[in-house]
Image (spheres, rainbow, N blue to C red):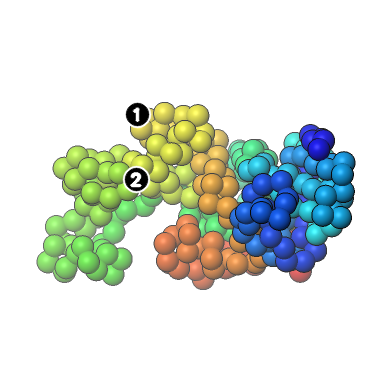
Amino acid sequence: MNFIKKEGIAKALKEFHLRKDYPSRQTIVIRQISAGETIKFVGLVDDGENINDNPNWFKTEEGNYFWSGNVEMISDQPLTIENYQPITIAQLCTIILCAPVKVIELINHLNQSMIEFSIITPLQQAAFIAQTAHESIGYTTFHENLNYSAGALVRTWPKRFASETAILYARQPEKIANCVYANRIGNGNETSGDGWRYCGRGIIQITGKDNYKTCGIGLGLDLISSPELLEQPANAFRSGAWFWKSHNLNSLADKGDFLGITRIINGGTIGQEDRERYYIHAKIALGIS
């Protein structure tokens, strides 16, 4: 068996199974690949013995395998800035409906983060931009807005706030964060201040001490000591792209499962109408029919 190092992207021609080990009768199936789904590969395995009458197998960056006969090659070049098709200022303005001056400083962060975390097909890019634009209000803020009225607190967190208690927290973002995020996602109790310290930041709203720690490891940043680093544009975009890749959202984007992506990001479907609006604009801007 010969392994040839070669990066690229393949598109599934039909449904098939991604395999854990080099193919054999005892191989372990990882998951089913859907027709039309794109897969990044990092190498080509030439069995040299025509095992199971199959020619060559591709190896993914996770170390799994798929047969070349099930896919067509989209790109056999490494994913670098030289062959990545960048989002333009005009396209981004069309998607988030703003003037060019508003996105000039952000466009490079958007493109670099998508390159770094392999968000490269038009469907992947459209879904990523739509979801993160909603989460960041059109890339205008990288810090969670917790300035809730008493009524909004009751509607958003009915199990935590009654009308009487909501009045005590209304329009106090820090106090609200410390309450609603207490004793969960790695945070301490309400008096610890962790809820506010690790409230939502970045273009996809990384929230909670545990998630800050994991994200920090992924980005090479100390987000436990300096959570505010996610408010810097470069880190805000990188954190969103890191979350996207770590939750395998490209696979849902390639299937067109936009609602499924929302459920993973939001935990529900809050803001779906606005997300869909961005998605429609993104697909038009990127030429997706």
In the displayed structure, 25 sits above or below 1; it is: below
Look at the picture and state if 155 lies above or below 58: below
Task: Give x and y (percent) for residue 232.
Answer: 48, 35
- Which residue is found at the position 36% from the left and 42% from the top? 210
- Kind of residue sitting beneath label 2: Gly
Q: Say whether residue 73 is visible.
A: no
Residue at horizontal 82 percent and vertical 54 percent from the top: 52
Helix, strand or loop under label 2: loop
Give residue 283's quadrant in the image.
bottom right
Which residue type carries mark 1? Ser
The answer to which image quadrant residue 47 occupies is top right
Q: CA distance from mark 1 to mark 2?
A: 13 Å
Q: Earlier in the sequence, mark 1 or mark 2?
A: 2
**Residue 166: x percent and y percent?**
18, 62
Residue highlighted by disc 2: 208
Residue 104, percent from left and from top: 64, 41
In percent of width and height, residue 173 lies at 27, 50
Q: Name the image quarter holding the N terminus.
A: top right
SS for dot 1? loop
Q: Which residue is mark 1?
A: 225
